[in-house]
């Protein structure tokens, strides 16, 4: 039977419809499409796709089950190694991980592994009725700091081994970046809540509104009887460019902008937190978070949204799929240009704040690409005399984040690098005995699946450490 050269298209909302709602853009495969896509898998002997997965999902086996229409069996195979399959099927960059290793991809488009993972996870969530069985306790307690992808993965792996796991989350909802950072139209919050609920059924305790470093310290967690601590607190400290005008009203970090919309529901008609709606918006940056912020601004009613990025389309770090969706929705990409000033005016009628000012525009300079820099991408250089202005009412800075220094500053003996990331060895162990870390708190902002891989590795190390104490 001839192999289809291209993966089956993902059904989506029409661009002119989805640009005005927060419903999920991708509609998911039908069972028929999933089976046909699974049949494209060659089931090759070496299974290179598994090596490309940070959590080592047995990809050939779960795809083989789909070929047989055994969708629940396919889910159970994924669930052996992944605590968040419905999440990964939606937001993981499969094109640079498992799918990039697919043997079929040498000649044709690779198998749509992520789309198949999403399908079987959704099938399970819609059809499975069996409750998760809590394992028998082994009598050991572990604390997890942060309920993002690394923390939830570490918690799930340990809970399955019988550990009594407590997750401490600073915000009022569990999920970390999955709930505050990724918009509803890419990752519905009911999906995250479902995954969190499964962990609770395993016996994981999740305590929200607990800021480790303020409410409790790492040392106090040990005083409470926890035998090991995993720090998965993410990278929530936004970076700025330090250009004139960044203090004006209407300038947001992408973290703030997305948190207000995603977690605090500022898009509602009666929001409890304000956010810029309407007008013209410039989003500075070219990563996935920048795409999320730009597409969110559009759905909040912006009449015009710009992506301002200092390199070309070829260097844009965002996923190809997200860029294409943004372009289809009408986002205006202003490439090879860089902001040098945010323009504004003071509201003389409001004397409450002497520095009160509002954004009126952004001044940029055109760029050209020179030699590659340390990242391997060509270094952008300003073109003298090429300055121009864009009239905008809000600016969202999306140029990266760093780990919050709170835990580092309140934990004795915890070593960090010059970027504030916690230093760990290959096992995820920090410079403190029995204190492990992973995810963005170590690497800075990265992918969901890489954070999950770090959480999985740390869970294995914690288990080995506690067992070694009993020997």
Image (tube, rainbow, N blue to C red):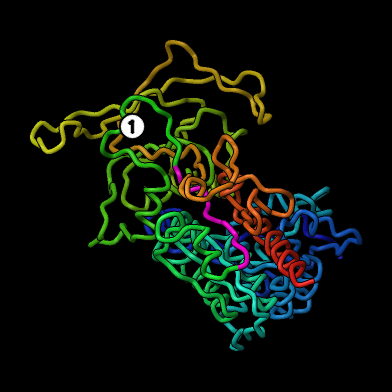
Q: Residue at x 82, y 60 (%)?
A: 3
For disc 1, the neighbor class at 10 Å (few under 14, some 14 to 19, many from 20) is: many
Residue 272: quadrant of the picture:
bottom left
Q: Residue at x 15, y 31 (%)?
A: 354
Which quadrant would the N terminus be assigned to in this image?
bottom right
Q: Position of residue 366 (x, y in %)?
A: 47, 20
Q: As drawn, which residue projects farthest toward the top?
A: 385
Q: Nearer the viewer, residue 60 or 146?
A: 146
What range is drawn magenta here?
A: 227-237
Q: Nearer the viewer, residue 235 or 128?
A: 235
Q: As drawn, which residue projects farthest toward the left?
A: 349
Can residue 328 be seen? Answer: no
Q: Position of residue 470 (x, y in %)?
A: 75, 72
Residue 397: quadrant of the picture:
top left
Q: Position of residue 267 (x, y in %)?
A: 31, 58
Q: Which residue is mark 1?
A: 246
Relative to 271, 227 lies left or right = right
Any magenta on residue 57? no
Q: Residue at x 35, y 41 (%)?
A: 252
């Amino acid at each position: 039977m001839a192999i289809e050269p291209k993966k089956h298209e993902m059904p989506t909302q029409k661009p002119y419809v989805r640009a005005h709602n927060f419903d999920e853009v991708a509609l998911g495969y039908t069972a028929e499409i999933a089976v046909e896509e699974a049949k494209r898998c060659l089931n090759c002997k070496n299974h290179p796709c598994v090596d490309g997965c940070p959590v080592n999902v047995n990809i050939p086996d779960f795809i083989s089950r789909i070929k047989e229409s055994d969708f629940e069996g396919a889910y159970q195979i994924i669930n052996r190694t992944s605590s968040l399959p419905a999440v990964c099927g939606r937001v993981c960059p499969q094109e640079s991980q498992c799918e990039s290793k697919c043997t079929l991809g040498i000649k044709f488009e690779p198998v749509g592994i992520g789309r198949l993972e999403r399908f079987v996870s959704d099938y399970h969530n819609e059809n499975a009725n069996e409750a998760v069985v809590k394992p028998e306790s082994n009598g050991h307690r572990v604390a997890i700091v942060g309920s993002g992808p690394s923390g939830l993965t570490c918690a799930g792996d340990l809970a399955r081994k019988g550990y009594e796991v407590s997750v401490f989350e600073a915000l009022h909802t569990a999920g970390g970046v999955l709930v505050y950072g990724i918009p509803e139209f890419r990752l519905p919050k009911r999906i995250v809540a479902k995954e969190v609920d499964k962990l609770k059924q395993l016996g994981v305790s999740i305590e929200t509104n607990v800021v480790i470093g303020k409410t409790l310290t790492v040392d106090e967690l040990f005083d409470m009887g926890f035998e090991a601590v995993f720090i998965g607190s993410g990278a929530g400290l936004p970076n700025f460019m330090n250009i004139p005008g960044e203090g004006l009203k209407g300038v947001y970090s992408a973290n703030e902008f997305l948190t207000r919309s995603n977690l605090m529901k500022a898009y509602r008609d009666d929001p409890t937190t304000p956010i810029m709606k309407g007008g013209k918006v410039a989003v500075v940056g070219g990563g996935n978070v920048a795409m999320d912020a730009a597409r969110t601004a559009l759905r909040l009613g912006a009449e015009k949204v710009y992506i301002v990025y200092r390199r070309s389309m070829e260097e844009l770090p965002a996923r190809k799929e997200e860029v294409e969706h943004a372009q289809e929705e009408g986002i205006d990409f202003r490439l090879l240009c860089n902001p040098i000033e945010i323009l504004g005016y003071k509201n003389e009628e409001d004397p409450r704040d002497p520095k009160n000012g509002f954004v009126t525009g952004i001044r940029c300079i055109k760029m050209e690409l020179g030699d590659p820099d340390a990242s391997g991408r060509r270094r952008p250089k300003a073109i003298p005399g090429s300055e121009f202005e864009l009239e905008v009412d809000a600016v969202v800075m999306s140029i990266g984040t760093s780990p919050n220094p709170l835990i580092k500053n309140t934990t004795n003996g915890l070593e960090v690098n010059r970027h504030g990331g916690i230093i760990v060895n290959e096992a995820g162990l920090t410079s403190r005995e029995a204190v492990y870390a992973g995810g963005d708190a170590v690497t800075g902002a990265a992918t969901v699946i890489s954070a999950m891989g770090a959480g999985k590795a740390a869970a294995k190390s914690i288990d080995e450490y506690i067992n070694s104490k009993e020997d």
